[in-house]
Amino acid sequence: MSIFSKSAMVVEDDPSFRAVAEMMLRRMSFKTVVAAEDGELAWAHLNLVRFDFILSDWNMEPMDGLELLRLIRANPPLSKIPVVLMSADLSLASWRVAIDAGATDFLLKPFTSRQLHETVEIAFGASSSDEANVIKFSEHRNDRMPGRHRSPPDRSPPG
């Protein structure tokens, strides 16, 4: 996957985490990385500039990442952009809501550069087909990739 000509936007209200996520994406060689501190600012950016990838926190105000995702998916010129939601709080219910709303993937915070890189690679692979949300993740078990949650989290008791 070549991302040298691609642009990314990080949407995160925590300044420290936003800076870390920006740095991770820059190190992955995205041509442009833009940051927004909430969904409203991100939406304003998206109405002026097109991005190739969006990494968005879920829990922000005044507009959260899920609301931003729904606006993106409802807007045909933007609807195919890979959008990865991230959160420090993941339940099976929230995972289902994110995927049903059209999230390309979901990352559990904190995550590593490697986990983000793998997610970006998968996101670009997913966005190149008409079946962006239909990917065989059985090969990517959560226990081998601890920040990745495209597959539902396993909440069963150890046995």
Image (cartoon, rainbow, N blue to C red):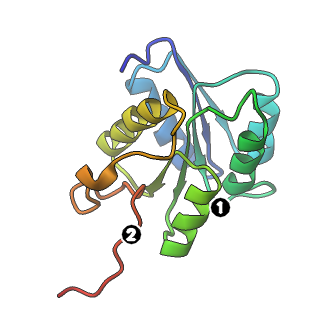
Q: Residue furthest top?
A: 5
Q: Which mark is residue 153?
A: 2
> Pointer 1: what residue?
59
Q: Can residue 24 be seen in this view?
A: no
Residue at (47, 20) in percent of width and height: 30
Q: Can residue 57 be seen in this view?
A: yes
Residue 50 x, y percent position in the rendering:
70, 22
Front position in the image: 106 or 20: 106
Location of residue 153 with respect to 49 vertically, above or below: below
Residue 124 x, y percent position in the rendering:
45, 30
Name the amino acid, label 2: Pro
Q: From the viewer's perspective, is 59 left or right of 86?
A: right
Question: Which corner quadrant of the image does residue 116 belong to?
Answer: top left
Residue at (39, 41) in percent of width and height: 119
In terms of secondary structure, where does tag 2 sit?
Answer: loop
Name the amino acid, label 1: Asn
Front position in the image: 53 or 36: 53
Q: From the viewer's perspective, is 129 left or right of 73?
A: left
Residue at (48, 40) in percent of width and height: 21
Front position in the image: 154 or 68: 154
Question: Which corner quadrant of the image does residue 148 belong to?
Answer: bottom left
Within-10-Å neighbours for mark 1: few <14, some 14–19, many 20+: some
In terms of secondary structure, where does tag 1 sit?
Answer: loop
Locate the C terminus by quadrant: bottom left
